[in-house]
Image (cartoon, rainbow, N blue to C red):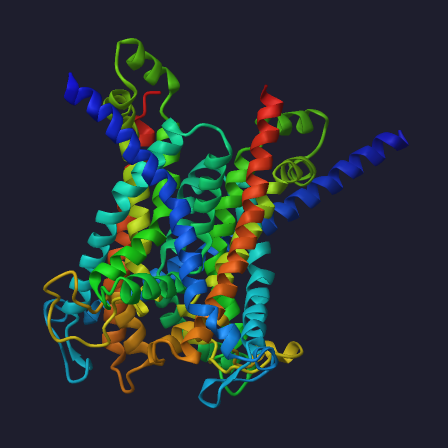
Amino acid sequence: MQNFSWREFIIPCLIKVSGYSAILFVGLIFLFLIHEGAPALVEIPVSTLFSIRWYPIESNFGILPLIGGTVVVTLGAAIFAIPLGLATAIYIAEIAPRWAREILKPLVEVLGGLPSVMLGFLGILVVTPFVRTTLDIPTGLTAFTGALILGAMAIPTIVSVAEDALDAVPRTYRQAALALGATEWQTIWRVTLPAARSGVLTAMMLGIGRAIGETMTVMMVTGNAPILPTGLGALFRPVRTMTATIAAEMGEVANGSVHYHALFLIGIILFLISLVINIAVASVVFRQRKRAERILS
Amino acid sequence: MKSVKSVVSRSKRHNLIQRLGFAGMTLAAIVTIIPIILIVIYIFWQGAPATSWEFLSGFPREGMRAGGILPAIVGTFWLTLGTGVIAVPLGIGAAIYLAEYAPDNRWTRIIRIAIINLAGIPSVVYGLFGLGLFVLFLQFGTSILAGSLTLAIMTLPIIISTSEEALRAVPNSFRVVSVSLGGTQWQTIRRIVLPQALPGILTGVILGLERAAGETAPILFTVAAFFLPQLPSSVFDSTMALPYHLFVISTQVPGMPIRIQYGTAVVLLTFVLSMNIIATIIRSYTRARRQW
């Protein structure tokens, strides 16, 4: 009997600890990024930090070109991943026959599970030469190539989250719209999509978050030139993103050097970006749940 | 008469719009799906001829330009196993807490926000964190231990969210009956809820480990060795790993035979894809058999 009550006490404790561990890990990640990255703010003058030259060998730590690179590649990816992803989600949730849905959903998951290094590898061997010859530009290692592959990687995230949201819209909404004489197409656009809009928004944000954080693919196919992208032409020139900079340079720096601290500082920026996106997502998720509870009660 | 006509023409127009719209959506889905199938087929087609027994079981020779990739395969195997050993108990524990114990209060909401955030942190930032905490601060060095810990924390949110979903899918009446028969809460979870949710949890675990097996950025600074002619002998050894090896031979080594690159890609793809297929099979099998 004693053994029995001991187990009833210790196991829930362990379970509770593992539940709270998520908070611990986020805290630890932030702490260690700050610990290793904050010195950069002291060591590097602000004017240097916000300059447009990233050339660590000459102590030029301008992060603007890197931020610019991330923005260009991410926007490029979003421009075609969001419409394609949402359209695919609508097709799977609303239009496709049952058998097509059963095939499409696992296939999209396969794309989501493909290692980014493998897509980068294919990018180098297949996409890059294709981009170079079709667009007739000196190199295929451009922001555009990166955006193309990154978009493909963001699509599974967008599709699965948006499809979930569309699926969660009560069937009665659709039936009511159809009974009032709306076509299926009108029902999708004027009833189902608006009802699922917070989920659709979440899908877009998570897709963009995925694109910002992607590392190996962009490092392999964007050419890695830390030049501040300006104008539309920048899309077809090499760029360097924040993630690629960390991955490419961390292996070669001395621990504790200014360069090392600067790379952690970029890590802090990336962490904060993902924090903002995900807190926004979380607030949408919670608001939605509350609304659902209100309706149901 | 006129109004009837206009109604008819309007409904015709709506029909046309709907047909065009549906065609557009279908086209988008096809544009999304076809490349996935092409990628998989293309890699197998290019790489399958390179995968001989010697390639799978041999060590790299001549600056990795010949021989096999055994150390990378073994390294990825150990890393995936290490990640599982750490992330699975922790993840399932957290899922049980959230699904069965957690009260609906501010702290639980903070846990959920933390999990959502963990899921969104870029993989390279995990690499930085692993370098800072495990490799340098705790002095594990670049080792399987440091890499597994880093990958485990990255995998955690996937395992937690899928396991929680599986636990929540178990009908509440199961719990009510168990408790009314005198079962304690832990007995109810262990003997009633967990077995019912097991297939769902397993699916989540496999999908999480699949992601860990394919990741490169978190292991760049925590485990990965450019070239190691021997197999790791303890958790404090660094090791080669398939994804990192693919990165190295496709960008860092000049004059790399294309055959070996595609061969490595095929092995990595097979590793990842087989996990994916197992997870899909478990899921559809249990969904078909579920009695509630």
Q: In this orientation, which residue lies closer to the viewer: B251 or B111?
A: B111
Residue A256 at x, y = what percent?
Answer: 37, 76
Residue B25 against residue B67 in the figure, above or below: above
Q: Is residue B205 left or right of residue B103?
A: left
* Camera sees residue B195: no
Residue B260 at x, y = what percent?
Answer: 23, 75
Farthest residue, direction top: B181
Residue B253 against residue B132 in the figure, above or below: below
Question: How many numbered marks, from 0 up?
Answer: 0
Residue at position x 56%, y 72% in the image: A67
Q: In this orientation, which residue lies closer to the viewer: A64 or A191?
A: A64
Residue B105 at x, y = what percent?
Answer: 50, 31
Residue at position x 38%, y 51% in the image: A25
Q: In this orientation, which residue lies closer to the viewer: B13 or B74?
A: B74
Q: Is residue A141 left or right of residue B292?
A: right
Farthest residue, direction bottom: A58
Q: Quadrant of residue A252?
A: bottom left
Residue A154 against residue A194 in the figure, above or below: below
Residue at position x 61%, y 38% in the image: A196
Q: Quadrant of the C terminus of chain A?
A: top right
Residue at position x 58%, y 48% in the image: A280
Q: Is residue B37 left or right of residue A53?
A: left
Q: Is residue B281 left or right of residue A250?
A: left
Q: Quadrant of residue A105?
A: top left
Q: Quadrant of the N terminus of chain A?
A: top left
Residue B87 at x, y = what percent?
Answer: 28, 47
* Camera sees residue B63: yes
Q: Quadrant of residue A191?
A: top right
Farthest residue, direction front: A42
